[in-house]
Image: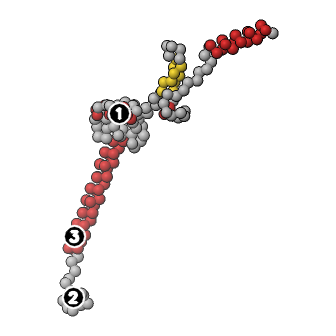
Amino acid sequence: TDLSSSSSFFLISLYAMAGSDKRVTYRRRCSYNTKSNKTKVVKTPGGKLTVHYRTKNASGPKCGDCGTVLPGIPHLRPKEYSRLSKNQKTVSRAYGGSRCGGCVRERILRAFLVEEQREAKNSALAAAREEAKQQAKATKPTAAPKGKGKGRK
């Protein structure tokens, strides 16, 4: 019995030396496992377990109309965009860095078609007005004799 108790003590001490306890403590103030507080456990050269904080993955800018990811602009966290120059944050085109090329093409086409429609409507109204004037001249009524009527004074 004395031998079995000493061997179990040996196994327990081996288990403790193997580093079964992988618990670490946070190094910042937030003590909850939230999306912004993700960590990675790292073993230092001295054998100590410490915590490295992970950064969130950047999704990159998206088109404001259709929601597709904008090509030509790097995927960074918002703070990192402040460190970039302007030509790295945009595309040299109208609405570059805000809308994708297909949506810009649609906007230009829509503006052109609306303008065309407005011009067609105005020309149709002008033609109808001219036609009404021509008909009014053709069927000009004879002048009525002047007299006292019930008009306003």
| Residue receiving disc 3 | 134
Real-space Cα separation, disc 3 to disc 1, in angstroms: 66 Å
Helix, strand or loop at label 2? It is: loop
On the image, the x and y values in percent for residue 21 come to 61, 20
Q: Residue at 53% of width from left, 33% of height from top?
A: 31
Given the current orientation, which residue lies at the most extreme bottom position? Answer: 148
Q: Residue at x 23, y 76 (%)?
A: 139
Q: Decide which of 120, 153 is in the foreground and name it.
A: 153
Q: Quadrant of residue 97?
A: top left
Which residue, given by chain and number where applicable, does mark 2 sit on?
153
Q: Nearer the viewer, mark 2 or mark 1?
A: 1
Q: Quadrant of residue 8?
A: top right
How far, Cα to Cα, is label 2 from label 3? 33 Å
Q: Quadrant of residue 2?
A: top right
Is residue 3 at least partly visible in the picture? yes
Residue 102: in sight, yes or no? Answer: no
Where in the figure is residue 40, as x and y percent of width and height? 51, 24
- Provide the residue designation for mark 1: 81
Type of amino acid at the residue the image marks with label 1? Tyr
Residue at image x 69%, y 14%? 12
Question: Three-letter amino acid code at disc 3?
Answer: Gln
In this rendered view, identify the residue nearer to me: 63 or 13.
Answer: 13
In the image, taking residue 98 as reference, residue 51 lies left or right, namely right
- Three-letter amino acid code at disc 2? Lys
